[in-house]
């Protein structure tokens, strides 16, 4: 009989949750004496008018009033969300969010600081502790496993609990975790995955795969012992998702992942030039050493599906009739947002992929589960390229807005968060409106501030990494890895630090910048979003989604319906 381990879900009564919401967000009714709002009556002591006439006061009071209105409309019942969308900004720590909102605002002609990204307007925000079971500063595999399964695990492990050991295939047995996407699939919802990284990379992989090592994206990356022991590479697990899930829970009949869009063609193609795509950038595009062509296997499994590799094919997909969509737009990760125009074949933006995915998934009246990752924020930071990291964060904000425009607040839970942060800093005392990518210019001055070494410095910097580079108008941050490291402080006086190819200085020289270990923000809107409020273990993200969509209960019901009937 197919079974699932019952999760330890916290259940609060409506009255308890209502009281919690009131205490957490200050939801005092607008007509309660003592609340000064934009509607405050004229009978106010004159001594108080200076404050309440100030625009900062009135704007903040209006924000409280709006949060109050949203909280009062919120359904606290489990299962109120028909649709669930999880956005993950890979490496999008709080400093990244702050700098990106200023960056976007300045691009729009504002000072920048007052700007808000789309998800910055969500009514509920909390903090998530990102550490792995065995690591103080986490990686994407362990953190995304926590968010998708509700269980924290070790660094480098995908879809397995902490009793599994990285690189040990046999340790996976008995330690596999079910994910929110799998529960949604069993429950009859449509499911989708979108990422600008490789679709087999750690974050998207944690939605569908079980692997003792995040690097096992294709068999050429696996040790012979793991293959001999029967472990399946991550790309193969994506194509065989439907088959594997039905084998794990005998009797169920699922229809597989409807939408999978991202990069990583090399993980699915054999190491044979005859298998190259028409826009292959390498002489041999595929990395697989087992002769399997997983694209052909996917097409055989889903003959009515659409496989696309470029903008033209993507644009041609009919979302009303397409039953499955598989898009692999690059050999490895997709381009940075500012570098997309340099792809001769053309790549869709994260916003376009998100909108297309929703257009297909919402054909299911039972609802859908969608995970969207802005994977290249992380890569920009690793390359010490604030420009690219911020540009991709702004694109994530646009994708979130597209999702909000395409769905209803009444039946769709949207969560925006990060898997981890980065060693990224915003410092100095720059004046209001100072270019966020620029050199620090202090209040009351028109000249760059000088450090004790007599050199100017930028507002944004990194604690570690490859460090300073001036690559001019180069939009591909990864080109930094083809140049020699430049250690120590540099004289930036004559340099334009706001160009696409400027890479910030670092304190500690490393081959690549590292993750940061601080908590990350969790933003929520829609049914169940109030549960993100507070400071929590990162694994709570799964439980919020599970509560909002009643995923475990729906999946359990589907499993019980498929068990063999006992004969009398």
Image: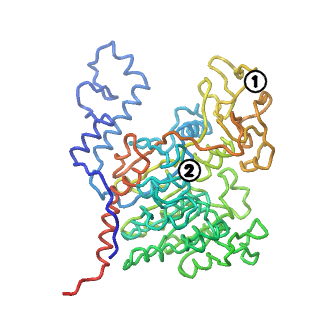
Q: Is residue 59 left or right of residue 113?
A: left
Q: Position of residue 221 (x, y in %)?
A: 66, 65
Q: Is residue 57 left or right of residue 77?
A: right
Secondary structure beneath dot 2 equals loop
- Quarter occupied by residue 509: top right
Task: Tell me the crowding category of disc 2: few under 14, some 14 to 19, or many 20 or more residues within 10 angstroms, Cα based.
Answer: many
Q: Earlier in the sequence, mark 1 or mark 2?
A: 2
Secondary structure beneath dot 1 equals loop
Q: In the displayed orientation, state which residue is furthest to the top.
A: 47
Q: Position of residue 363 (x, y in %)?
A: 43, 69
- Quarter occupied by residue 545: bottom left
Q: Is residue 174 left or right of residue 215?
A: left
Identify which residue is drawn at 70% across, 52% down.
Answer: 339
Q: Position of residue 497 (x, y in %)?
A: 73, 35
In the displayed structure, would residue 39 be above or below residue 92?
A: above
Residue 420: image tag: none
Of badges 1 and 2, the one in the foreground is 2
Residue 455: image tag: 1
Along the viewing direction, whichever of 255 and 496 lies nearer the viewer: 255
Q: Position of residue 30 (x, y in %)?
A: 27, 33
Q: In the displayed orientation, state which residue is furthest to the bottom.
A: 568
Quadrant location of the N terminus? bottom left
Whether residue 311 is visible to the viewer of this picture, yes or no, is no
Mark 2 and mark 1 in contact (Cβ < 8 Å)? no
- Quarter occupied by residue 84: bottom left
Cα distance in 3D space between marks 1 and 2: 35 Å
Residue 139: image tag: 2
Identify which residue is drawn at 31% across, 57% down.
Answer: 80
Identify which residue is drawn at 63% across, 67% down.
Answer: 222
Q: How is the image coloured?
A: rainbow
Quadrant location of the C terminus? bottom left
């Amino acid at each position: 009989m197919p079974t699932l381990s019952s999760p330890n879900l916290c259940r609060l009564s409506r009255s308890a949750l209502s009281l919690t919401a009131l205490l957490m967000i200050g939801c005092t009714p607008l007509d309660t004496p003592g609340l000064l709002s934009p509607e405050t009556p004229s009978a106010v002591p004159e001594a108080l008018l200076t404050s309440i006439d100030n625009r900062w006061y009135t704007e903040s009071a209006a924000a409280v009033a709006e949060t109050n209105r949203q909280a009062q409309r919120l359904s606290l019942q489990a299962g109120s969300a028909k649709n669930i969308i999880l956005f993950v900004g890979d490496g999008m720590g709080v400093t990244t969010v702050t700098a990106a909102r200023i960056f976007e605002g300045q691009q729009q002609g504002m000072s920048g600081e007052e700007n808000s990204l789309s998800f910055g307007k969500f009514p509920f925000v909390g903090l998530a502790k990102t550490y792995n079971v065995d690591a103080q500063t986490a990686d994407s595999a362990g953190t995304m496993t926590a968010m998708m399964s509700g269980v924290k695990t070790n660094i480098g492990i995908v879809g397995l609990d902490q009793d599994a050991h990285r690189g040990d295939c046999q340790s996976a047995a008995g330690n596999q975790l079910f994910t929110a996407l799998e529960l949604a699939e069993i429950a009859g919802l449509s499911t989708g995955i979108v990422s600008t990284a490789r679709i087999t990379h750690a974050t998207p992989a944690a939605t569908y795969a079980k692997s003792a090592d995040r690097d096992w994206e294709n068999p050429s990356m696996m040790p012979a012992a793991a293959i001999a022991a029967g472990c399946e590479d991550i790309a193969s697990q994506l194509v065989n998702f439907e088959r594997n899930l039905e084998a794990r829970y005998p009797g169920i009949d699922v229809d597989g992942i409807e939408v999978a869009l991202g990069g990583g063609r090399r993980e699915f193609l054999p190491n044979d030039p005859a298998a190259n795509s028409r826009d292959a950038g390498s002489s041999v595009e595929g990395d697989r050493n087992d002769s399997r062509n997983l694209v052909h296997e996917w097409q055989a499994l889903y003959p009515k599906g659409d496989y696309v590799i470029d903008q033209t094919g993507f644009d041609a997909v009919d979302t009303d009739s397409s039953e499955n969509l598989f898009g692999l737009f690059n050999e490895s990760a997709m381009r940075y947002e500012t570098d997309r125009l340099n792809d001769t074949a053309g790549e869709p933006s994260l916003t376009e992929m998100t909108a297309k995915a929703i257009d297909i998934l919402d054909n299911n009246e039972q609802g859908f589960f969608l995970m969207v990752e802005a994977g290249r924020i992380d890569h920009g930071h690793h390359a010490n390229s604030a420009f690219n990291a911020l540009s991709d964060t702004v694109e994530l904000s646009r994708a979130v807005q597209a999702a909000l425009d395409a769905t209803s607040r009444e039946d769709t839970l949207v969560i925006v968060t990060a898997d981890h942060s980065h060693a990224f800093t915003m410092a100095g005392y720059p004046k209001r409106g100072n270019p966020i990518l620029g050199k620090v210019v202090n209040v009351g001055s028109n000249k760059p501030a000088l450090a004790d070494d007599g050199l100017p410095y930028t507002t944004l910097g990194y604690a570690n990494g490859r460090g300073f580079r001036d690559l001019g108008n180069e939009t591909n941050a990864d080109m930094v890895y083809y140049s020699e490291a430049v250690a120590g402080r540099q004289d930036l006086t004559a340099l334009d630090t706001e160009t696409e190819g400027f890479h910030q200085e670092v304190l500690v020289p490393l081959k690549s910048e590292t993750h940061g270990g601080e908590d990350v923000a969790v933003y929520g809107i829609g049914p169940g979003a109030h549960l993100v409020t507070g400071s929590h273990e990162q694994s709570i993200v799964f439980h919020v989604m599970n509560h909002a969509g009643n995923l475990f209960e729906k999946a359990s019901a589907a499993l019980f319906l498929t068990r063999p009937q006992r004969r009398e």
